[in-house]
Amino acid sequence: MDKSLLSVGLDVGTTTTQLIVSRLQVKNRASSFAVPEMTITQRQICYRSPVHMTPLLGQTLVDGQGIRTLVEQEYEKAGITRQQVDTGAVIITGETSRKENAAAVLSALSDYAGEFVVATAGPDLESALAARGAGAVQYSKDTGKAVLHMDIGGGTSNLALIEKGRIVATGCLNVGGRLLKITPTGKLVYVSPVLFPLTDLRPGDYPAQGQVEAIARILTHGLEMAAGLRPATELLGKLLTREAGGWEIPKDTPVLSFSGGVADCIEGKLPAGSFGDIGPELGQAIKQSLLCAGDYRLGTETIRATVIGAGCHSTQLSGSTVFCRDVDLPVKNLPVAVFTPEEQESGELPQLIQKRLQMQDSPRVVLALPGYPAPSYGQVSRLAQKLLQGIGDREIFVCLEGDMAKALGQSLCLLPGGDRPCLCIDRVHLEEGCYLDVGEPVGPALPVVVKTLILSEGRI
């Protein structure tokens, strides 16, 4: 039976906050006698809010009440009430993802959020969300081409390298439109400390003709280096953010893809000072650079690439042979890292797990693997060893498609270092961009709610 859901996505970022309302058409793929399993068949955007400046108390502390007022006003403009909203997602990005800010936002929106997916996105997760929301992941999947997606915002540029529709690396540079803030009279009111090694300009100065454009070109050189289009110098190291760690320059030249507020300035020739920052100059510097000399594309969404994610929930039951030790159920909003059969068999699986865990700003992450249809003792034991090597000292959360959760859980807990909270479930299919809720047992099985971020038009 088809059903219509009203879905809300809210992106609270360092510089801007925006809200989007969508109507989702979902269909129950399960039979009348089975637990519902919903799939999205259509998605229509009903309302896009204006792009608001994020209300702040000081430089980086979010005004929770200001966010609530903004949401109330946008609900009214969209012609909806919170009682009408079925599902959604609150994505807290950039500097606003700091714990105290996330707590302020969630406290202010507690009676709005309800059963929403709530994600605090560090630079790695933000890179992945933007790449999916802008359509870069789908483009790579459809064409088979390697894509380097750059989400260029106010303070940073989040990078995602995509191969055959899978994100294989993420990074973050201190490159953004609001590193300089300028009044209509041309006076600098803010200069990011990131720029201090690159310019003598300071707040209160009036830049000479060409100075702002020169800074935009320097920042663009950093992006070119990250893409492998210009030999790397110490500039790249200066611009890389500490939170995101290092960045491995692509060996072959990928297709370049852009989103974020600055992406709107690449094709649109906006006059300097349009936003009181250097976004227009940075956009034009990118347009005239090596980044746009070859194959490039603007995202299907640019400034809204992250907020386009709104959650949809589907309910399943796990298999009946699950393993749960020292995990207090229910657990909610666990991000999911998905591994292919080839990755499961790879000797590099521990390293791949470590890399994917770093991309999630959460201490609890579900590892989703295909498992084996008829596993031998050796297969279960080897997989358990690889998982423990990759997980490190974290709690263990594993979801398998094959029916082997109990055997794997027992193997994990018998290994050195396996004496920790452990949850293994099976007979559940998960995809990238999912979040997972696991409830208290129903007989021998566990109820599982899969929350999917819808990051592109149509089917997920």
Image (cartoon, grey):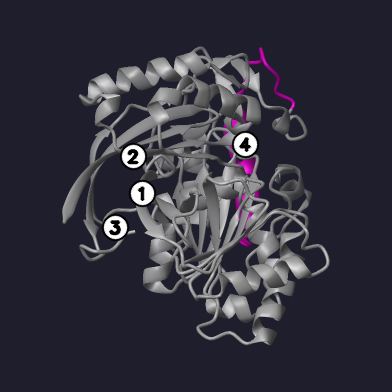
Q: Would you place residue 59 above or below residue 377 in this image?
A: above
Q: CA distance from mark 1 to mark 2?
A: 7 Å
Q: CA distance from mark 2 to mark 4?
A: 46 Å
Please report the residue visible at 65 percent of the width from the left and 45 percent of the height from the top: 173
The mark closer to the camera, 3 or 4, is 3
Q: Would you place residue 65 above or below residue 174 in this image?
A: above
Image quarter in which the C terminus is found: bottom left
Which of the two labelled residues, at mark 3 and mark 4, occupies the earlier sequence position?
Answer: 3
Type of amino acid at the residue the image marks with label 3? Pro
Type of amino acid at the residue the image marks with label 1? His
- Residue 87, label in figure: 2
Image quarter in which the N terminus is found: bottom left
- Is 202 magenta? The answer is yes
Q: Which residue is mark 3?
A: 36
- Residue 96, label in figure: none
Q: Would you place residue 333 above or below residue 146 in this image?
A: above
Which one is nearer the viewer's eye here, 38 or 297? 38
Mark 1 lies on a secondary structure that is strand
Q: Which residue is mark 1?
A: 313
Please report the residue visible at 53 percent of the width from the left and 86 percent of the height from the top: 374
Bin the neighbour count of mark 4 within 10 Å (Cα to Cα): few under 14, some 14-19, many 20 and up: some
Residue furthest left in the image = 1
Q: Which residue is mark 4?
A: 214
**Residue 439 picture location, percent across and down:** 48, 49
